[in-house]
Amino acid sequence: MQNPNVHLSAPEKRILEAVARQEERMVLRLKAWSEINSGSHHRAGLDRQRACLKEAFSELHADMQEIDLPTVTEVQSNGQEVARALAPALLVRQRPKAPVQVVLTGHYDTVFGADNAFQNWKMLDGDTINGPGTADMKGGLLVMLEALKALEESPNKDSLGYTVLISPDEEIGSPASSSLLMEYGKKADLGMTYEPALADGSLSGARKGSGNFALVIHGKAAHAGREHHLGRNALVAAALAVHSLADLTGKREGLTINPAKIEGGGPSNIVPDLAIVRFNVRLTLPEDANWAQQQFKAITSEIDKIDGISAKLTGGFTRPPKPMAPPNARLFEMTRAAGAALGLEIRWRDTGGVCEGNNLWAAGCPNVDTLGVRGGSIHSDREFAILSSLVERAQLSAVLLLKFASGEFDAKSLKA
């Protein structure tokens, strides 16, 4: 990378000082947004959160629109496949014809449904907030916004255009927004995604790929005592399938299969005629996806051969692996240099987690995907964010954007 030692000009320092003055406003917004339940399937809450985002991002004075997403097919607890409509995505575009194009992505859904007990924030200490979405990733959206506002103060802003894509379905694998991620990832020179950094400030490096599947098994109901011999137990077949699926873990390097839930059954005096096995897959190599799916199909076929049992596999892979390939490594070095200019030591760790950065990479877009707040314990009621990192991380992204706009960081070199 050129310019490993990055220096901030006097105008850039003034821009970053303006970011710091937004801290109180950022904290207030984070608290207010955390109290809005925006679980992936809670449409009313998602609509409220999106309205707040539209108001906040209007400060960029950019083109903004809501994008209706295609319906997605889901397997219900009764075994039926139904089409579900999701909330719209929010798209913000500024200077689409500028020579350098950046796509910034994030999500406004959380894993906490409307009936989840975790609904409010509280302070754990003077700098740590515990609340739904504080780290993952309402805090990250605030970081993104303030960094873009900083860019708009740069005399070089006309050299850099950006697309902001904020989706409502990241926490369920981006089944509806994946096509938009692909579309705008292909058009961009680089991507910036706002999942939380680790509490110590480390970023994610290589990421595994991921897929979600459901195996629907039908049997035959019967009285468990009088006519047990006439029944065909779907739960027993499901147990066999779970055992076979779990045995695939480790059969390819980095491959894990997590049978997460078995649904079905009822009163203990009835032979259960329905079972649904839901499972998640993580893998390191793209080619292992085909191998894994062939194994799933073989297991499904074996279950389907059991007398009186039928089985159907649904689902697929939605997040390809994201390696620390040379383009991503070059962007990481730029991020490290931007951090050094702020006195931050930026490190990275490989992870089994997945995010929209996986999808951007699949579109050929180098990206850094943990530019959000420092935090942890996400996807639990212990989720926390470090409030001082709102400004810290907004300034980090601002330096990246300012340097790409000035040409000190060469965005075009990332794909070279």
Image (tube, rainbow, N blue to C red):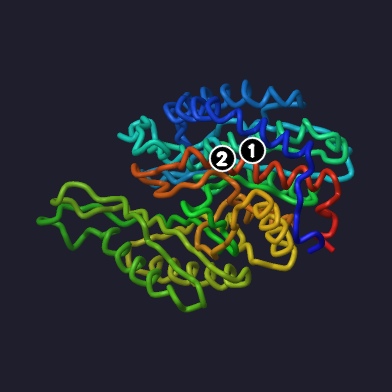
Q: Residue at x 43, y 74 (%)?
A: 248
Amino acid on which disc 1 is placed? Met
Tag of residue 220: none
Looking at the rendering, which quadrant does residue 333 occupy?
bottom right
Find the residue positioned furthest to the front.
10
**Label 1, on which residue?**
144
Classify 108 as above or below 380: above
Amino acid on which disc 2 is placed? Gly
Find the residue positioned furthest to the left.
225
Quadrant where the N terminus lies?
bottom right
Q: Residue at x 77, y 42 (%)?
A: 402
Does residue 136 appear left or right of residue 182 in this picture? left
Classify 391 as above or below 379: above
Quadrant where the C terminus lies?
bottom right
**Label 2, on which residue?**
140
- Asked whether 383 or 340 is in front, the reply is 340
Q: Position of residue 154 (x, y in %)?
A: 80, 34
Q: Are marks 2 and 1 in contact (CB under 8 Å)?
A: yes
Does residue 406 appear left or right of residue 401 in this picture? right
Q: Residue at x 58, y 42 (%)?
A: 392
Residue 183 shows up from this direction = no
For marks 2 and 1, give the CA distance: 6 Å
Q: Position of residue 161 (x, y in %)?
A: 81, 38
Q: Residue at x 32, y 67 (%)?
A: 307
